[in-house]
Amino acid sequence: MKNKIKVYRAVHDLTQEQLAKELGVTRQTIIAIEKGKYNPSLDLAFKMARVFGVKIEDIFVYEESSQKRTIHPLKPSIQWDSSETG
């Protein structure tokens, strides 16, 4: 998942260390998230959004893979025999 954390850090004049301290994580965690090597928990993403004063969607950009998945409707797992009513 791509993100704009580095941009928002610059706008708010925060170092990786300062942001990490504000969020209660390590600097290494911030580095990994910025590089796209680690996706933060939903809780951490909400904390970041609060620190920057924006919505989560403003920070994180979801990219679908180039292979589109086709979702097929689920088939019922139980077949009812209409002769067994009553």
Image (cartoon, helix red, strand yellow):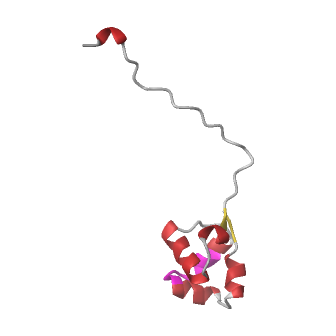
Question: Is 73 placed left or right of 64 in the picture?
Answer: left
51 in magenta? no
Residue at the image position 69 percent from the left and 52 percent from the top: 64
- Residue 16 lies, with reference to residue 32, above or below; the image says below
Q: Position of residue 13 (x, y in %)?
A: 68, 91
Q: Residue furthest top?
A: 83
* Quadrant of res 45: bottom right
Residue at the image position 62 percent from the left and 72 percent from the top: 33
Q: Residue furthest left?
A: 86
- Residue 72 lies, with reference to residue 84, above or below; the image says below
Question: Is 21 placed left or right of 10 in the picture?
Answer: left
Residue at the image position 33 percent from the left and 8 percent from the top: 83
Q: Position of residue 28 (x, y in %)?
A: 59, 79
* Quadrant of res 54: bottom right
Q: Residue furthest front?
A: 86
> Which contiguous range is marked in magenta?
23-32
Question: Is 86 placed left or right of 52 in the picture?
Answer: left
Image quadrant in which the N terminus is located: bottom right
Q: Position of residue 42 (x, y in %)?
A: 51, 66
